[in-house]
């Protein structure tokens, strides 16, 4: 897919580090599968992975965790 940010590069399979922050909770997840632009480095996480990340952040919020750093684990 052509990168919508730089409009020059093509995206290919790669990994991303995603940081989510909400209501004082910070979740950092490393190794998230993503499409990465070979030109500008922009990262695109698919819908299924994004849903899992948001669920993890919601669980941390409910558990009272303020900071969590983890590796991505496929379902």
Image (spheres, rainbow, N blue to C red):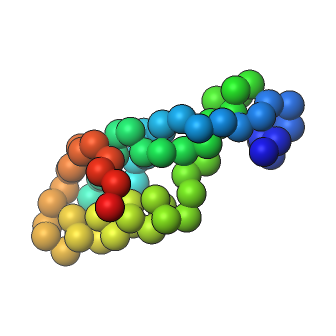
Tell whether 55 sits left or right of 65: right
Q: Is residue 69 visible?
A: yes
Q: How many marks?
A: 0
Q: Which residue is most to the front?
A: 75
Q: Quadrant of the N terminus?
A: top right
In the foreground, 67 or 40: 40
Q: Which residue is most to the right?
A: 7
Is residue 70 depicted above or below 63 in this figure? above
Query: In the figure, residue 22 lies in which quadrant?
Result: bottom left
Tell whether 39 sits left or right of 42: right
Q: Is residue 28 visible?
A: no
Where's residue 68, x and y in %? 21, 49
Residue drawn at point x = 71 percent, y = 37 percent? 11
Residue drawn at point x = 14 percent, y = 67 percent? 64
In the foreground, 57 or 12: 12
Residue drawn at point x = 54 percent, y = 44 percent? 34
Tell whether 61 sits left or right of 34: left
Q: Quadrant of the C terminus?
A: bottom left
Is residue 14 depicted above or below 63 in this figure? above
Residue drawn at point x = 19 percent, y = 74 percent? 62
Query: In the figure, residue 2 lies in which quadrant?
Result: top right
């Amino acid at each position: 897919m052509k990168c919508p940010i730089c409009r020059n590069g093509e995206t290919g399979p790669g990994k991303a580090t995603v940081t989510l922050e909400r209501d004082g909770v910070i979740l950092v997840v490393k190794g998230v599968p993503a499409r990465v632009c070979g030109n500008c480095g922009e990262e695109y996480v698919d819908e299924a992975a994004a849903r899992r990340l948001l669920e993890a952040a919601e669980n941390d919020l409910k558990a009272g965790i303020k900071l969590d750093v983890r590796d991505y684990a496929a379902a």
